[in-house]
Image (cartoon, rainbow, N blue to C red):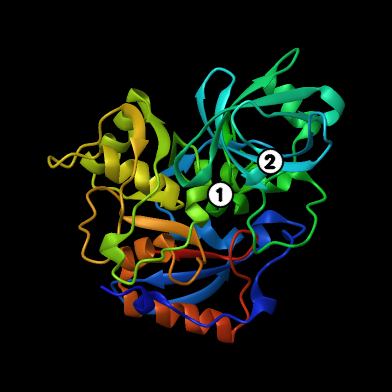
Amino acid sequence: MKLHDFWYDLPERLIAQNPLEKRDMSRLLVLDRKKDVLEHKHFSDLPGYLEPGDCLVINNTRVLPARLLGQKEGSGGKIEFVLLKRIEADIWEVILKPGRKAKPGSRFIFGDGLLKAEILEIAEEGNRIVKFFYDGVFEEILDKVGVMPLPPYIHATLQDKERYQTVYSKINGSAAAPTAGLHFTPELFDIIREKGVNIAELTLHVGLGTFRPVKTENILEHHMHKEYYTISPETCALINGTREQGKRVIAVGTTSVRVLETQTREDGRIYPGEGETDIFIYPGYSFRMVDALITNFHLPESTLIMLVSAFAGKDRILNAYQEAIALEYRFFSFGDAMLIL
């Protein structure tokens, strides 16, 4: 399977630079796989496609303001860190630039000294292992000195940091938002619950690897990034009960899919656990747990468009994308959504 099989042309003007004023007024492209038809709705219409007893599975991760702009101690040279993964306590793996300034032993200052860092070692792909020094609570310091690490295709300044968080975000740890969830509002959840739909939570901390381009022409040679996840016994019981009653498990976002498919065994049941998943889902994959999927529109030749192509069929997905482009849907993180039934 070739990388270019997942290419499509997207006019740059359709890349959403800002979130809409109201989250659930995003457009919703509904793809029914059985009927092979498309419908054009708004996200607020979602409850009409849900049935009592269905289970929405959401990812409650919260994005850290993980982009740090600072100076090298002594010389004052500018540096940019992006927190990638917490290794232990105050030791993190980070992406940084310019890399030549960051040799082991180098020290950097952020936020007028509220946060300091020392390079411990050089990691894979030129990343660095660093130790942070501060007084107080690390997350509170980050809120003061950090900036949201928006994707590289977003050039506008985000006025409200909470608009790059889902309304149900709880657990700090992501370097990027689980963007399918950005469309939900508390009021929409009220309607969904009143309809008898269950909501199950899990956590997957989205890494910046989610934006890493696939560089191998044979996609099977791509090295998939790892992301930390955890899923509780209570969530598993709710999901397994949904399946036993013949109802649907509806994943909100590809991040939820990755956890559900990682933890579902051959007996068709999902089990609690935590760890790092590097599951790579592409056409030919047989889904064990996910019955329907809410997702955004994904970059050409990305692992995410491969995942949704595995779920709905590559030709069907690319045809849906062409129709969305023709109707000028908004794409990517702050863009519109799809519901794949």
**Dot 2 surroundings within 10 Å: few (below 14), some, or many (20 or more)?**
some
Q: Residue furthest left?
A: 267
Q: Disc 1 marks which residue? A: 181
Quarter containing the C terminus:
bottom left
Of circles 2 and 1, the one toward us is 2
Between the residue at mark 2 and the residue at mark 1, the CA separation in whole angstroms equals 38 Å
Residue 222 circle label: none
Q: In front here: 207 or 269? A: 207
Q: Residue at x 35, y 41 (%)?
A: 259
Q: Residue at x 37, y 30 (%)?
A: 231
Image position, residue 163 (x, y; %):
71, 48
- Establish if 163 lies above or below 144: below
Q: Disc 2 marks which residue? A: 101
What SS does tag 2 mark?
Answer: helix
Q: Earlier in the sequence, mark 2 or mark 1?
A: 2
- Establish if 231 lies above or below 282: above
Q: Are marks 2 and 1 in contact (CB under 8 Å)?
A: no
Q: Is residue 207 left or right of residue 259?
A: right
Tell me, yes or no, if residue 341 can be seen here. no
Q: Residue furthest top?
A: 135
